């Protein structure tokens, strides 16, 4: 996080936490994923994943792709989404931390993670472009 521009990394972290919690809440509400073991009882989402792990990984992804072309941005998504998907699969099969239900599987998780990385990258690209525009003065 200390690597400049800190403003961009903080925006990505907050945006990713917000988007992750909305997606996770939607998936849990539709009974596709359940979390039998909860860190905090009144959260039915994965608090650690949605608000800490996924946003931090997304910040690193955006740091790595800051000056990449579109094809490399897409290729580098796999560097992050494949290990995270495999880790989620491990937790689903070997522990009681997460359970897939009603047709949800590892491929859905992979696609959701990959698309959310791409959405966060597009978001910060829009922020950077908007930041470079001239703001008219008040008269």
Image: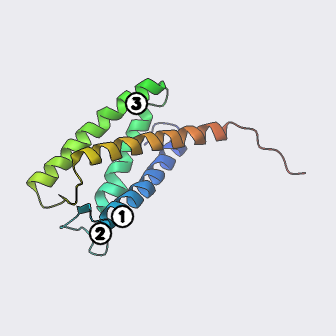
Answer with mark 3 or mark 2, whichever residue precedes in sequence.
2
| Pointer 3 local density, CA inside 10 Å: few below 14, some 14–19, many at least 20 | some
Which residue matches tag 1?
25
Which residue matches tag 2?
44
Residue 65 position, x and y percent, is 44, 30
Answer with mark 2 or mark 1, whichever residue precedes in sequence.
1
Answer with mark 1 or mark 3, whichever residue precedes in sequence.
1
| Residue pictured at 26% horizontal, 60% vertical | 32
| Pointer 1 local density, CA inside 10 Å: few below 14, some 14–19, many at least 20 | some
- SS of the residue at dot 2? loop
| Residue pictured at 54% horizontal, 45% vertical | 7
Q: Quadrant of residue 133?
A: top right
Say if mark 2 contacts mark 1, CB within 8 Å.
Answer: yes
- SS of the residue at dot 3? helix
Which residue matches tag 3?
74
The CA span between labels 1 and 3 is: 26 Å
């Amino acid at each position: 996080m200390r690597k400049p521009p800190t403003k961009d990394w903080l925006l990505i972290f907050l945006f990713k936490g917000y988007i992750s919690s909305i997606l996770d809440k939607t998936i849990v509400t539709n009974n596709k994923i359940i979390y039998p073991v909860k860190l905090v009882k009144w959260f039915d989402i994965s608090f650690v994943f949605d608000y800490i792990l996924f946003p931090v990984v997304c910040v690193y992804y955006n740091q790595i792709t800051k000056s990449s072309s579109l094809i490399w941005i897409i290729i580098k998504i796999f560097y992050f989404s494949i290990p995270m998907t495999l880790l989620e699969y491990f937790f689903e099969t070997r522990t009681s931390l997460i359970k897939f239900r009603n047709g949800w599987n590892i491929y859905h998780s992979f696609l959701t993670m990959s698309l959310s990385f791409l959405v966060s990258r597009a978001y910060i690209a829009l922020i950077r472009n908007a930041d470079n525009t001239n703001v008219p003065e008040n008269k």
